[in-house]
Amino acid sequence: LLALDVNDQLVWMVDLEKAVEESNEEDDDDDEEAVGGHGDDVSGNAPKVRSRWFYAASFLQENSPDMMGDDNDDIMGMNLASEGGLHITCLSHAGHVVSVSIDETNTIASKGGNLEEGSECIGSFENGLECGGWSPDGEVLALVTFASDEDEDGNEIVNDKDLEAKIPILMTMNTQYEILSEVRLDPCLFSLHSNNAGDGPLHPNSILFCWRPDSASLAVSMMDANVNNKPLRRIRTYHRTTLQILSLSKEEDGAGRDVPNLLPVPPTWAPAGCSHYVGAVQSSRPLSMKSARARQVSMQVAFMEPNGLRHRECKIHNTVAAKTDKEDVIGVAFNLEGDLLAVTSRVTSVDAQYGKVQLYHRNNYHWYLKYELRYDGNAGLPSTVVSAMQFSDDDPYKIMVALNGQEGGFLEWREYTFRWDSSTVHYRNHGSSSSSVLAMAIDGKKLNFTPLDKAIVPPPMYASSLELPAPVVGITARPCLFNEAAKEGEVEFIIALSNGKLALLHSGGGSEIGVSLIPGFQPPSLLAIVDPFNINLSDETVDSSLSLKGMALRDITIIDANDDSLTVAAVSCPMATSAKHHFVDHLVEMKISLTNDCINAEGPVTTTTDIMITSSLPLEERALRIVNWSDTAYSEGARGSALLELTDGSLLEYSQGGVLEPCGAGPLLEACPWIAGVYDASSDASSTSLTTDSSALQGHDESSRRLVIGLSSRYRLYCGERLLSSASSSFIISLQHRFVTHVTIGSRPQLHFLPLASLCDFDPLMGSDENMVLDGYEPRSVERGARLVAIFPAKPFAVIQMPRGNLESISPRALVLPYVMMKIQEGDFYTALDIMRRQRVDMNLIVDFDPSEFLEKGGAEHFIGQIEKIDYVNLFLSSLIDVDTTLWKYPVPSWILAERSTPATPSQHTEDSKANKVCKKVRQVMLDAEKDGVTSSGKIVKEGHFLLPVLSTFAKENPPKLEEALSLIKGNASRGPSKKSTRKSVLLSEHVQSSIQYLAFLADFELIFNSAIGMYDYDLAKAVARHSQMDPKVYLPMLKRWKELPESTARYEVDVKLKRYESALRHLVDSGQAEEEMYDEDHTAKCLKFVEEHSLHKLGLDLFKSDKANHRSIMVSLGDRLLSDRKPEEALTVFLAANPRHLDGGKRASRA
């Protein structure tokens, strides 16, 4: 038993066999019973052959003496500063149970004494131990032994060569090694263990068990001797306290069938987040020992629910290099959260053995093979086998792997910490045959592609896939570089494989392109495979001392590229040696040359002469992450540079040629595995990030300002030394939209948007009123557990993944509004209106964004020319209101205001309102287009094409011009093609009726009917009334009567109905003149009465100025009205002005 300190240096070593011998010598004269009462103590017969020790684990003994010294070194990750005595229990198949006190052994080691004195052999089981282990809470020790041959039940033992059927006994003990309970299990097959056996696969008849993570129960896997007259491996679960059987492994179909073909691999129990199911390795068909060596079989990890029923499985990928290689699974384990499943295996090839650890990630109801650790000597080192693998109890993404060297028999252990990105999305600017937003997923040897901009394919489905020679362990995408035009056929991805080689993928591979489920999408294809560990040193410029042998590459990043080469930076980790256990990372720069030899019509060619190491720099700390700058396409200084983060949170900038210097963004408050940086975040650079002219995008190092966003493992989001969010699951920097977008975690998760301009101008010394860094646009609520996958660079769409695995494309206001404003500013009204219509954005923004541009500088002409659908024009006109939406509803962002060539003048509508101005302007543009027969965009239109939008402009004005609208309808109907029909009016045609119905949609039917009769067009009024709610018994006789009356009389009655009294008086006077040459007394009295009732004296005086008598009567009536209104002075003037004077009225006025 070895103990190491935090520096991996040996502290002490205890010989367990010697400890057993010394304990047996001390107890040689005692006659104690064996522990557990199932055999005599064999302390007097010390074993001459070394036992095979299979288990060692620590526990806190309750009543151990206090022997804590000052030298409290950490041993294999154990905390020795715990209260109480920390012990290690060691078990062997020979039956020995040894307890090693860490505190006492540390004290003895510091004094140079006999280390075995700190150990005690608790006892030995006569029939040996098959398996055992402490519960996760360290309170119960479970052991499996066998009953003696002289069992009181008289069980018959069947001997068949080396196989025996025995009765196993399952027992539990406490921390004082006192038996709590025991139970006899069903007879099972059993194979004798060889004490000098290696760490190979377990025998098919081995008994295995595992504890439930909450220590409530345990599962035992053993080969039952007789199940339907044949042996069969079963898994049973037992209660922790009573050892009562809880479940037995069965199929889930309800037929009661046993789960077949379970393999002798220790089962694993998933944590609470996975329904506490048990995982066991299962083969596809029953195999004998001979057939297992002769052929390959598919294997999977079958999961059993707590009730024992099998439910789902994880298929184990067969990734051996040759078909003749044989792979044996030797272990499976879940991580702390249950989303990772590690499968440890051993591969036997023709000339060697090597180990593998495969990590499967559960998502979308599918287990993906995300990573494979392969120890086949691919880095120039001898191959090794995996003897043990264990997940960390604290970090769910940290594992420890113990290796056993095949040459020299050396022992080695390694620690790995994995960083899981929420998504791998590549943004590129290529033709229509490829995708601008390409999502990639790793699943073993397959690399799955999904073009999110063409179809949102829910995982685990995908649009296309590419199978590679070995499992994929890393993806490196080629960034969009400054002053570089995208070309078909260029290398786009560098794929790291588990065998240490690199696969180069390119677009436009012709016949090599895989099958795609989405029409028009061409996935990347394999171009070449290079081996970075076999470098050709024939070039004189290559330093022969630079080599990658014995190193492991990670975080490969493309920092520069041209037509025939790629410049990449990677972090190299040297392997441990016997003389050196601790080391630092190196930052390696490599140049991958691309020659025509890499292209072959028959397929990819493995090449070893096209990669060269140009520099290697040692780092002060371990490297945590290296990434490209987010603005490599916009900033000249970002090309050939990369952002490097160390494990202590410090930030460095690496430049091509081996230049490493501190980053101007400063260190992060804590180490962040997920980072993204902007090389030039100054206001000038950010304001031109969407410009396509490369000359306007050049950054200047003198004035550039770095901006780094990081997400820690505790899900805290930082911007330099500032905390942006205390709980976020993922984030993305979108330069095209000028936002940092992140998804928060909690009871009310939201999608937040932080403007980059606010982050750049943030001053931590200013108050909250001056710093609006956390305001931005209003957040968008999302489902709990959602993660941000991608933000489209050219569209206002964001893709998020729900916890169930499905993908959703959303358009938050923070992305839609700036996108619409940019399109309006560019004059692309069609795209802007389409997005506004879909996302229900107020269409007044089209005018309010720049009123002068729309009304005076040709904006309205471009709008009518681009919008082909009449309904869209009507929708725009119907939404007009006399309010500037940019002042309160949709404020224009500062970066958009800065990009305007001329500042927009605020809308000032002095004489007329905004809606009236827009309606008049748009109406004039549409009428001119109909007159010319063509729009500004060149579209040919006929007369009447814009009838409905023109009607909308009339109806939308304040007040509505319904008479003009009805006149337009009637005029358009009369100009239409004439049909020889004498019985049906043209106003009753379908075209006119549909126009009237549309006008009624914009205004009230009664108001339209009144406008029609106000035009004295009774046929038009009848056509309008047909589709109203008016009673035909009312309006038909009324219209018929008006048509039969004299014109002036009918118009008089219409005006009276519409309360247009001045017009009614005129028509009343005209009706009298039409009927008689002179006014009769009755008609005159009627006119005077109408004047008095409606106070129309002024109009009456004007109409009867030639009739002195009636003129005087109206003057007298006006005087009486003024006198009744208590205006005697005005009344006196009117009475005296009458011709002749009305003296009586003058007297009354003078007395008043």
Image (cartoon, rainbow, N blue to C red):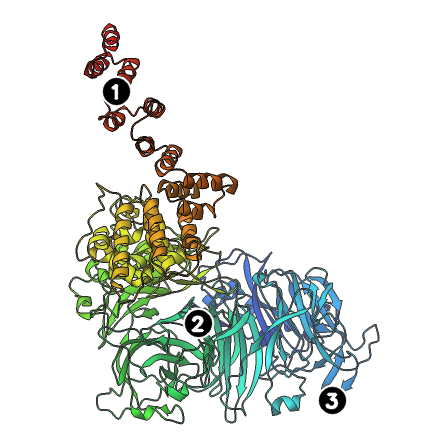
Up-down relation of residue 357 to residue 764 (above or below): below
**Image check: 719 left or right of 157?**
left
Instruction: Report the amino acid beneath label 1.
Output: Ala
List x then y, in percent, for residue 33.
73, 68
Up-down relation of residue 508 to residue 993 (above or below): below
Instruction: Report the amino acid beneath label 3.
Output: Lys
Instruction: Report the amino acid beneath label 2.
Output: Tyr
The residue labelled by disc 1 is 1109
Q: CA distance from mark 1 to mark 3?
A: 147 Å
Up-down relation of residue 363 to residue 1072 (above or below): below
The residue labelled by disc 3 is 161
Q: CA distance from mark 3 to mark 2?
A: 44 Å
List x then y, in percent, for residue 849.
26, 52
Judge whether residue 199 can be spotted in this image: no
> Mark 3 vs mark 2: which is more N-terminal?
3
**Image check: 166 left or right of 340?**
right
Residue visible at 38% across and 92% down in the picture: 605
Disc 1 is placed on an element classified as helix
List x then y, in percent, for residue 459.
50, 70
Q: CA distance from mark 1 to mark 2?
A: 116 Å
> Mark 1 vs mark 3: which is more N-terminal?
3
Residue visible at 26% across and 88% down in the picture: 544
Mark 1 or 3, closer to the camera: 1
Q: Quadrant of the C terminus?
A: top left
Disc 3 is placed on an element classified as loop
Mark 1 or 2, closer to the camera: 1
List x then y, in percent, for residue 416.
44, 72
The residue labelled by disc 2 is 416
Q: Are marks 1 and 3 in contact (CB under 8 Å)?
A: no
Judge whether residue 91 can be spotted in this image: yes
Tell which residue pokes out farthest to the top in this image.
1151
